[in-house]
Image: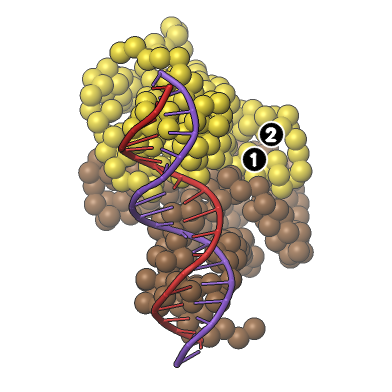
Chain colours: A brown, B yellow, C purple, D red
Amino acid sequence: MKTSKTEQEILQAATELFLEKGFAATSTTDIANRVGCNQALVHYYFRTKENLVRQVFMTNLEQILNLLDQPLPEGLDFFGIADYYIDIYYNYILGRPTAPLMIINELLTNPERREMVREIFMKNLRRQLMYYNLDQALKQAIEKGLIRQIETLDLLIDIASLTLASFLIAPIYADLLQRDAEAQKEFIIHRREETKLLIRLRLMPQKI
Amino acid sequence: MKTSKTEQEILQAATELFLEKGFAATSTTDIANRVGCNQALVHYYFRTKENLVRQVFMTNLEQILNLLDQPLPEGLDFFGIADYYIDIYYNYILGRPTAPLMIINELLTNPERREMVREIFMKNLRRQLMYYNLDQALKQAIEKGLIRQIETLDLLIDIASLTLASFLIAPIYADLLQRDAEAQKEFIIHRREETKLLIRLRLMPQKI
DNA sequence: GTCTATAGGCGGATAGAC
DNA sequence: GTCTATCCGCCTATAGAC
């Protein structure tokens, strides 16, 4: 489907504003102002604001899920794999720090968005295969005593939790301690390494 | 300062609605409807919606921070202390699962709220003392080799991240896997135990 | 204190000229 | 495709009767 230059600009401006202020706080007039056109044009292309929101939401969500689809570099053990995924997610969010909040927020307050997530999951067989493969590999490694017992879902949630929270906490941290943007970035990188250490220790097969 | 019964009811209804739908999506008319009065009365007591929001926000934030002020039970080692705080926070949020989202959301989108947080921190000397004491105790334990090297702030953020994220992820998890509320609660309790394990392994003094 | 009524503004959406 | 003009509805807030 071909899209005109103006339509692209509107979509781009909408994405920026949604990430800055959230969906609810952004009006179609705001979007038009940033593009430099009038408000009617936004409705001409997308008819309703809801359509626009849906599209931005889906695009961002797809991007995040697609990060999992990349092929693994060869010759990594599980500790290397964990580090690899942690790096991927931190790097992605570093580029768009407010994206996870927008998505989380929308998922929590709007049940129909969760329906959209299930659709995306179910449609993508490759993603289901990825999960299955990871699950099998983990189980084997646990049996061989290479890593400590853990559910696959728990490992993923552990990583996601620590990554997500880093970005939620970073701006608050920076403001509370009156630090600048550079210090905020350093904080996130520091948290990335702490995350790697936590996960590594979680997987290391030593007795409790 | 004495507050009338109606004022209490309005505050209560506002709190409920803000936690359910967020600040922006809740109108003063919504609040009046839940109370069973008319919308003008809300403004009679609080003059502006912003005042109401501020009050609810501050109250919830204070409650969360006050959880840290409780005296520790005697005779716990650091692993016990960690478990103790993890339990406190999980139990609190189990009672009001959407409170953290409301606060995080407001802190991220509204810079002036962060100013309020700093005020609360700075005013409460006892809280600063608590942090100082924890910091000292941790440093000593590290020197003695009882626990692995860790920054005090990192330990607190580790715990907060995992706790917070559990509640953000729980409703999404339940919807995606089409589980009911009971399963959702089980998920959170399961995550609580996983959190304890992670922190325990992080603190255990063993070589990497 | 509690009500009705209403002002005033903003947001989403559409009609219609060009 | 892009614009101006405008409708409609909801929101916050206030005025004023009781």
Indicate the position of residue B96 as horizontal and vertical percent values. 55, 27
| Mark 2, secondary structure of its residue | helix
Rendered location of residue A10, percent (x, y): 47, 74
Q: Which residue is mark 2?
A: B184
Residue that extends furthest to the top in the rendered view of this protein: B74
Residue A151 visible, this orientation: yes
Q: CB atoms at circles 1 and 2 under 8 Å apart?
A: yes
Residue under the point 53% across and 85% down = A4
Q: Earlier in the sequence, mark 1 or mark 2?
A: 1
Chain letter for mark 1: B
Circle 1 is placed at which residue position? B171
Graded by Cα atoms within 10 Å as few (under 14), some (14 to 19) or many (20 or more), the crowding at tag 2 reads many
Q: Position of residue A62 (x, y in %)?
A: 61, 64
Image height of B138 relative to A137, above or below: above
Q: Quadrant of the N terminus of chain B?
A: top left
Q: What's under tag 2, amino acid-wise?
A: Gln
Estimate the x, y position of residue A2 in percent, counting from the top left. 60, 86
In-front residue for pair B80/B1: B1
